[in-house]
Amino acid sequence: MAIARIIAFYLPQFHPIPENDAWWGEGFTEWTNVRRARPLFTGHAQPRVPADLGYYDLRDPDVRQAQASLASAHGIEGFCYWHYWLAGRRLLELPFNEVLSSGKPDFPFCLGWANHSWTGAWNHQPRKVLLEQTYPGEADDREHFEYLLGAFRDGRYIRVDGRPLLYIYKPLHIPQARQRFERWRAWARSAGLPGLYLVGNHMGDFNDPTHLGLDAAALATLGVVYSSNRAFDLCQRAVWSLRRRLGVGGPRTVDYATLISHLLPEPIELPFEAHPCVYPNWDNTPRMGRAGLVLTGSTPALFEEHLRAAVEGVRHRPPERRLVFVKSWNEWAEGNYLEPDQQWGLEYLRALRRVAIPASCP
């Protein structure tokens, strides 16, 4: 078994859907913002231009196969596909549905429920609510579970101690989360599964995931660092807040090498099961413009150091539970992606491979 189970988050918004056509114009995809990005300060590396895979369309099965082949060759165990369920309404579901129905690519996966309202964040309008995330009750929970069950039963689905892994983006937003998740576990057992392994995205907003009905939490997110004095003192944050209110300056810039030292709390010291989450980079100015955050100075070597620290943090665990999440495989408009680009080519993936498969060639 690999020294760690590296799972990369996977964004499916690289194909047009009717909702995005209506909200943002015909043909809108993640590439729309990526292509129109411009440098906002000296040395700002925008726009980001894809290399080997090009400006792909996820409706093409050859693209999905090429992504899986790249990921597998460089030590990624599987993808965590973001899944959108808003009271029975699904969005961006086509790529994963085709992966599920076709059996291809033959590459492990799990689902991450992105249980947030749909806003204009993908197009510079984060306060504009387009579709509200609601939780109608048990009937909707059951319908949602039955949809998920089709994925859970797939032989490629990622499991922990035999239980399908489901990632929850905003567990605190779910009313009576513990009771809901217990129902899901009971339904899973009735369907012949040994239960579920539920991981919550930890943004410094809860102390014990088990109180929410979760089995574990994933650390850390940039949201934790945003509000942490470890990385930014009160004066810096006050000045930034004032500048944003006045509409001057920006984007905010933070040194990647400094930041990564704050992104990985020691999992072994926490009172609950915590899985690290690492970032190859971050620059969401294609979505947020001057209101965005840019990590400066990221390199494959620094990312390798970041990932190695995460892997070392889970070495003490049983092999099944040595989970390390990477954000992300393909979040191009947030600047966190592993796919090859014109600047670095395969170097971030090669850095990952050196950590995940130590015997591999440089």
Image (spheres, rainbow, N blue to C red):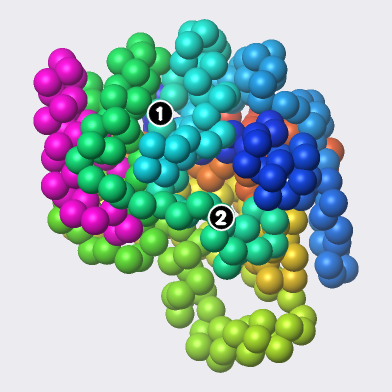
Question: What is the x, y in percent for residue 204?
Answer: 35, 65
Q: Quadrant of the C terminus?
A: top right
Task: Tell me the residue at 29%/59% (across/down).
Answer: 172
Residue situated in front as seen by the camera: 236 or 154: 154
Task: Tell me the residue at 28%/54% (across/down).
Answer: 174
First to last magenta residue range? 172-199
| Above or below: residue 8 compared with residue 66 | below
Residue 295: quarter of image? bottom right
As drawn, is 50 to the left or to the right of 293? right
Residue type for callout 1? Cys
Residue situated in front as seen by the camera: 233 or 143: 143
Q: Which mark is residue 110?
A: 1
Q: Are marks 2 and 1 in contact (CB under 8 Å)?
A: no
Q: Nearer the viewer, mark 2 or mark 1?
A: 2
Residue situated in front as seen by the camera: 205 or 319: 205
Q: Is residue 75 visible?
A: no
Residue 328 counted in the magenta span: no
Q: Quadrant of the N terminus?
A: top left
